[in-house]
Image: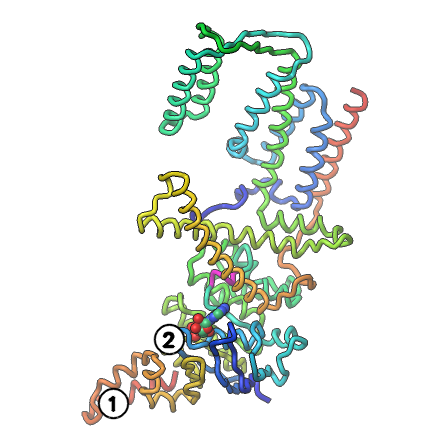
Amino acid sequence: MKNIVIGQYVPGDGFLYRLDPRTKLIAVIILMVAVFLLETIIELVVAFGLVILLLIAGKISIVRVAKGLKPLFVLLLFTFFFQILFNKEGTLLVEEILSLNPANLGLGLLLTVLWRLLARFGKFKTILLFLWIAGIYCLLRYVAIAPQWTTFSLQIHEKGIEMSVFVVIRLLIIISLSTIMTLTTKPTDLTQGLEKLMRPLKVIGIKSDDFALIISISLRYIPTILDEANKIMAAQASRGADFSEGGLKEKIKQVISLLVPMFIIAFKRSEELADAMESRNFVPGKKRTRIHELSFGWKDAVTSVVILLCLAASITLKVIG
Amino acid sequence: MSMINIQDVTFSYTGKRLILKDINLTVEQGEWVAILGHNGSGKSTLAKLLVGLLEPKSGTIAIDGVLLTPDTLYEERKKIGIVFQNPDNQFVGVSVRDDIAFGMENLNVPREEMLEKIQFYAEKVGMSDLLEKEPSTLSGGQKQRVAIAGILAMQTKIMIFDEATSMLDPTSRNELMAYISTLHDEGITIIMITHDMEEALYADRLVVLKEGAIFEDDAKATLLRKPERFREARLDLPMALKIQSGLSKTDEKEKRVRDFLWEFVSAK
Ligand SMILES: Nc1ncnc2c1ncn2[C@@H]1O[C@H](COP(=O)(O)OP(=O)(O)O)[C@@H](O)[C@H]1O
Ligand SMILES: [Mg+2]
C-alpha cells in the first residue's frame, strides 16, 4: 500500500516523455476526433498500425499498454457482442434457433457455479470466461428437450460482424492513445498542463490554478487515505470484525465503522492542511510563481504538425469517401 | 522594538473553557526561546495565535511592532515561518521538491532562485537525494525534514518549530540544531515548542506553560537551578540534571562531575 502509484506513469526516456504535457493532451483530443471521422475498417486498421508504430518509436512496451487495456476488456467484449447480436443490417449470415427449458437452465446454472469457483481459485480467468460463454451457447443451442419454455432465433448479419470489428478497433485505438499519454506523463505535469490549457476559462470565472492545486492535493492524499483505511480495517479486524463475512446488515455496520473514523480524520487533516498552507502565505487566487515550468520546444512543434496532418488526412478521407 | 509582543491574551475554542489565560510574553529580535509544557498545556494553540490562524478572545499580539489584525495579517505572516507538529498534514506538494517550493511560490520567488534554494536547504536537512520522492514513500522523520526545509527556504525573521523534530533520529536532530544555531547567530528569532527538555537546552530562555498560563519565564541557567518547578509543570528534567541530583555535594570527585554536568546543560 505504501508504494501505490497514482495514474499509470512509468518512468522512461522515449521522446514521448520529453513532450510538453499540453502537446500530449491536445494531441490525444485531436487524434480521437480524427479517429471518429474514419469510416472504413481498412482506415481504422491503418490507424491502429500507426498507433503501434508510435509505441515502437516512443520505446513504450506493448505489454504495458496491453496491461492498461485489461480493466477495459469486459467493455470491449460487451461492445463486440452487442454489435454482433443486435445489428440487423446487411445479408443474413447465420441463423440459429435457441431454446430455453428446465434442462438447459439447470445445466447452465451448474456451469455458472463451476465457472465462478474455478475463476476464484484458478488462473486462466479470460479463457474460463470464454469457455463459459461457449458452454452456455451450446446448452441453449443443442439441449432442446421438452417441455420448452420459449425459443428465440439468434441472427448474425454481415453488417453486424463488420460493425463489431469496427467499433472494437476504434475503442482499442482510443484507449491506447490515452494510455500512452498517462504512461508517459507524470500526474503533476498533467495537472500543470490542464491548468495552462484551462487558463482562457478565466473569462467565465474558473480559476484554473486553484483547480490544479485541488487536483494535485487530491493526488497527494489518495495513498495516505487508502493507507489509513487499511490501518483502521486492521485495527477493527484485531478487535474481531470480519469485513468479508456476515449478512447485509453486518456489512453495512462494518462499512459505517470504517467510514466514521475516516471522515473524522479527513476533517482534522483538511483543517491542519489548510492551516499549513495559510501559514506558508497561500492566498487563494493570488498570483504565485511556479516551480514547474512547461516549455514548448521543437519536438512539440513537430508533433503538432504531424497530428494536424493526421486530422487533415481523416477529414479528406471523410469528404472523398 | 520587540519582535513578538503578546499582551493579556486569552483564548478559547468553544467559548467555555479557557485554553490560554492572561498570556504576556515579549520576545526580542535574535532570541532563542523554548516554550515548554505538558501535552494539552496550550503550546500549539499559542503558536497558531502567533501566525494569526486563530484570533485571541481578548488581548493583542504584535509582530515586529505591527499589531496583528485582519488587515495586517497577510503582510506580517511573511515574517514568520512555522513548522507544525504533524508532518503528514502539512505536506502540500506532490513531491519533496514541490513541497519545499510551496511557500516560496506563494512569496513569488523567481524560479531560478527557488531551484537554488531548494537544493541548498534540502542539503541542510539531508534530503537532497530524495527531491523527486512522493510523500507516501517517505518516513515521518523525512517528512518532518521536508517541512523544515520548506520553512527555512522562506528565510523568515521568526521561525517557530512546534515539536518539529519529534521523529528525527538523534544524529539528524543534532545536525539540525547546529544549523538552527547558525541562523540564531545571524539574528533570526527562534521559538522552539517542545516537551523535550534536551531540545529546550539549546535555547537561551525557557517559557513554561501549565494549564494555559505562563508558569515560568526565565533565562535557562536561572530556571535550571529550580528543578522542582519543572516537576510541578509535569516536565521531565534533562538527563544531565537527573544524574547531577543523584551525586553527592561534598565528595570532591563527584562535585567535579556535578560542575561538569552543570557546564554542559547551561552552555549548550
Ligand atoms: N481545534 C480544537 N478545538 C477544540 N479544542 C482544542 C482544539 N485544539 C486543541 N484543543 C484543546 O486545547 C488544549 C490545548 O491544546 P494544544 O494547544 O494542542 O496543546 P499542546 O500543543 O500544548 O499539546 C487541549 O486541551 C486541547 O484538547
Ligand atoms: Mg501541540
- For disc 2, the neighbor class at 10 Å (few under 14, some 14 to 19, many from 20) is some
Q: Is residue B204 visible?
A: no
Q: Residue furthest left?
A: B251
Q: Amino acid at mark 2?
A: Asp
Q: Amino acid at mark 1?
A: Arg
Q: Position of residue B63 (x, y in %)?
A: 59, 82
First in sequence: mark 2 or mark 1?
2
- Residue A230 or residue A72, whichever sits in front: A230
Secondary structure under the numbered disc 2 in the rendered image: loop
Residue A158 has which mark?
none
Q: Are marks 2 and 1 in contact (CB under 8 Å)?
A: no
Q: Position of residue B196 (x, y in %)?
A: 37, 75
Q: Position of residue A28 (x, y in %)?
A: 67, 37
Q: Is residue B53 visible?
A: yes
Q: How was this image coloured?
A: rainbow
| Count of marks overlaid on the render | 2
Report the span colored magenta. Answer: B87-91
- Residue B157 or residue A200, whichever sits in front: A200
Left or right: A55 in relation to A244: right
Q: Read off the residue under disc 2.
A: B196
Q: Residue at x 39, y 23 (%)?
A: A113
Q: Position of residue A112 (x, y in %)?
A: 42, 21
Q: Read off the residue under disc 1.
A: B256
Chain hosting mark 2: B
Q: Main secondary structure of the magenta part?
A: helix
Q: Residue at x 61, y 68 (%)?
A: A281
Q: Residue at x 45, y 70 (%)?
A: B164
**In which quadrant is the C terminus of chain A drawn?**
top right
Which is more foreground, mark 2 or mark 1? Answer: 2
Q: Residue at x 65, y 57 (%)?
A: A210
Residue B88 within the magenta-colored segment of the rendering:
yes
Secondary structure under the numbered disc 1 in the rendered image: helix
